[in-house]
Image (spheres, rainbow, N blue to C red):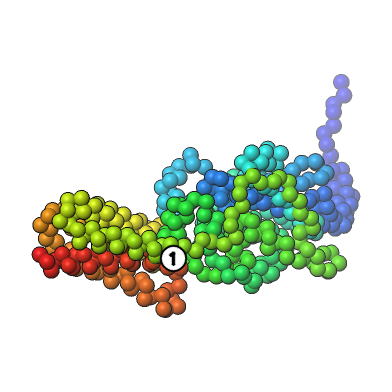
Amino acid sequence: MTRRRGPRPHVALLWILLLFPLFACAQFHYDPADAGTDIDIALVTFGPGEEIWERFGHNAILIRDNAAGAQRLYNYGMFDFAQENFWLNFARGKMLYRIAVSDPADDYPVYRAEGRWIVEQELNLAPAQRMKLFDYLEWNARPENAQYSYEYFSANCSTRVRDALDDAVGGAIHGQLVAPSRGYTYRMDADRLMRAEPALMLGMDAGLGPFADRRLSYWDESFVPMEFMRHLRAVRVRDASGQLVPLVAHESRVAAATVPEPPDFPPQWFWQALAVGVAFALTLLALARARTYTWARASFATLAGVASLTLGLCGLVLLALWTLTEHISAWRNENLLLFNPLCLLLVPAWLGALRRNWRPSHFAQRIAVTVAAFAALGFFLKVFPAFAQDNYLWIALLLPVHATLAFVLIRATRSA
């Protein structure tokens, strides 16, 4: 029986020494730019939908691997209502969104069924840039890297897509979009895109502070996916020969829309708001003068009480958004001078107006005068550039009401 001889270490070492130069030579001649030649990249933009969270549209990055015949859609707009403490985090402004990877063959039919248009913009990227973007997206899609802190205007799905593409082209997108502007603000874009939901639009407008009123460059306005798609058409990048070429090589509409397009301009409702505010104020004044009638007393007490209760509670919400949350777009909201929490202290006085021999206290009178003075201050502050918040609509609507309620209390106190 012959004994098998074991491996000889010096022979293995000799083979390694002989083959190492071949491996080293192969590594030296490897060109990383060739790694992205089989990859095509496109920006995919989805038009607005009918649901509230679809009004701003959406976008994603599509990567086609031509060698493997596969497509991957990198989507930064994923959130989950079942996430732990979702609504609490939403209220506090600590929202966590994540990136997800899917097949466009699965996603596109969903958007078509929602009546939303789909546009693909094929991008002029060098192979090395394609590979850089692909590697980044793959890294970002790992479970440990997928989540990010969401903010409506500065860190949403579109800004993440924008930043990823800009990094791939060495900052060329930022360099060309950071200066041009059409004079729009976050508020203007939010109002026009939410115009189909008037109640929600007005609530959002009232909750936005001066952060939402700075003029936006094209770079900033790219938080709206449809605007980023339009601005990208003007971006130029250098090709392998150093020539400037359009970043968007080809644009195609994959699906048509059945949902109406949002307007290009925000609504201008100043005069309507002033008319409503003056009409409501005159109604209160007329009812106060007719207090000898039971129906007039009941109507006045109801309208004044509901108005003060609503304005006071809204003021508490605005104050909480400023002091207790990370919703930076709601900080320093000048509407606190109009939606004043002090209005809650007036509710007992308005309930007392149900009595025929109503005798409001001097305390209630002083509170009403203070509230009206704050509302007037909100108007006069507009002459100072530091107070640039666009809240003229709310001043027009509420200043006449506060002034009238203060006048009614002063008159009633003196009469008593």
For the point 34% across and 64% down, the residue is 278
Q: Could you tell me how many numbered marks the image carries?
A: 1
For the point 53% across and 61% down, the residue is 266
Task: Name the residue carrying label 1.
Answer: 271
Query: Could you tell me which secondary element the residue under label 1 belongs to?
Result: helix
Foreground pick, 336 / 411: 411
Tell me, yes or no, if residue 263 can be seen here. Answer: yes
Q: Quadrant of the N terminus?
A: top right
For the point 54% across and 66% down, the residue is 185
Residue most toward the top? 1
Q: Is residue 27 left or right of residue 161?
A: right
Tell me, yes or no, if residue 147 can be seen here. Answer: no
Q: Position of residue 330 (x, y in %)?
A: 43, 61
Foreground pick, 380 / 1: 380
Q: Quadrant of the C terminus?
A: bottom left
Residue most toward the bottom? 384
Q: Is residue 177 left or right of residue 398?
A: right
Locate residue 202: give its quadrant: bottom left
Label 1 amino acid?
Answer: Trp
Classify 177 as above or below 97: below
Q: Is residue 100 left or right of residue 351?
A: right
Classify 133 as above or below 9: below
Locate residue 388: give its quadrant: bottom left
For the point 85% across and 32% down, the residue is 5
Give neighbour class at mark 1: few <14, some 14-19, many 20+ (Cα, 10 Å). Answer: few
Foreground pick, 34 / 301: 301
Q: Position of residue 80 (x, y in %)?
A: 52, 42
Q: Position of residue 134 (x, y in %)?
A: 72, 52
Q: Position of residue 40 (x, y in %)?
A: 78, 51
